[in-house]
Amino acid sequence: MVDVLQIGGLSLVGYEVARFLFEKVLERFGDRVVDVVGESMTSFLQSSSIVGRVMQPAFYRVYYSALRSGRFEWAFMRGVPHREAYLRIIRDSFLDTSIPAVANVAHTNNMYFWPKWAFSSMLLFTSLEIASPGAGEWTLKVEVPPQGIGIYNNRGRQFIKDYFLHRNPEGYREIREFYKTFMDMVASKEKPRNLRLGLRNRPLRWVAGGVIPLLWLRGKWWVAFPYRDIPPIGLNHFGGLSQDSEERMHPRLMALREFLEEFLILTEPPEPGAKATRKIIRVSGEFHEDIKVNRHFKRLQSYHKALREAQDGITIVDDKRDVVKMHSIDTPL
């Protein structure tokens, strides 16, 4: 019965720890585990994302409660550079709640635990480097560490702004100057030079971005911008922040997901209570080949359609015969 007790105890720890322990149980007891819980249950415990949803939140609650109390510091974020600085930021971000606004970035992927979860964005403390491999060409090099800390909602975004920007305004002015210097070089077509910017004590969020669509309509080129009615108010691009580790490693995937969540092509003006026909978008060319974004297409478009029907009262019908293809356009970057 020892093996059964060990398996039963897995619900008290995090998913990663749970899987590790379960694999150790399998190594030690082998077929006896399968005989007790069954082959299908063994496979379920090894791979199910549902188990992760249950185990991770329980693990996080214990993890961050212990972290806040100052006990067992040695057990947290092993192998993570700047561990002591990260621990201090996480503790400071608890504010008046039992859940921190900043966390181990690997944990911020779990939307089922964090209150008002909206994204999974890493705080980048490394460096940015802009180089020019040739005339009219620019490359942005970003050093993204495999581990670190991140934020998961707008409360964390505000905390980081208060914590770093207000403490180090001069450092962030240098970031704005870095950006301005680059844009001036592009506009003036002066001789390119390499630019480098360190981010210690003035982190940036990784990663944010989006898409600006150019549309050929009625014999003219148009640029589409959404209107944002919350701060910062005004015309914006179709974009946002990363939601998991895959998007942090592949920024194009994040940008296109945000675009497909927010952009629709309708054949009639959208009016509450009315029916509108939607044209299907197909992402092709370099985007599709590099990151396989079309695997997200149906889910994202269905989600957007459901929101418009629920929030705006617009009934959307798909016209699968009329497909709009979207291609990437080369830029200097």
Image (spheres, helix red, strand yellow):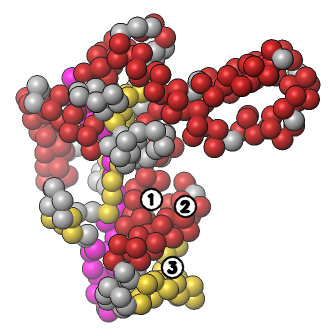
Image location of residue 267, percent across then percent down: 40, 90
Alpha-carbon distance for marks 1 and 2? 7 Å
Q: In which image quadrant can residue 86 be found?
A: top left
| Residue 257 badge | 1
Work out whether residue 10 or residue 281 is closer to the camera in this orientation and state it.
Answer: 10
Alpha-carbon distance for marks 3 and 1? 15 Å
Whether residue 113 sits left or right of residue 292 in the image: it is: left
Among numbered discs 3 and 1, the one appearing first in the sequence: 1
Among numbered discs 2 and 3, the one appearing first in the sequence: 3
Observer able to see residue 198 = no
Q: Are marks 2 and 3 in contact (CB under 8 Å)?
A: no
Q: Which residue corresponds to mark 2?
A: 296
Work out whether residue 242 or residue 332 is closer to the camera in this orientation and state it.
Answer: 242
Instruction: Answer few, some or many: residues within 10 Å of disc 3's Cα (few below 14, many 20 plus, some between 14 and 19).
Output: some
Task: Look at 40% across and 20% down and name the residue there.
Answer: 65
Task: Look at 63% across and 28% down and name the residue there.
Answer: 11
Amino acid type at mark 3:
Ile
Work out whether residue 256 or residue 316 is closer to the camera in this orientation and state it.
Answer: 316
As for residue 210 lying within the magenta part, the answer is: yes
Q: Which portion, as a residue range, is magenta?
A: 198-224
Work out whether residue 14 or residue 291 is closer to the camera in this orientation and state it.
Answer: 14
Q: In which image quadrant can residue 215 be found?
A: bottom left
Q: Which residue corresponds to mark 3?
A: 280
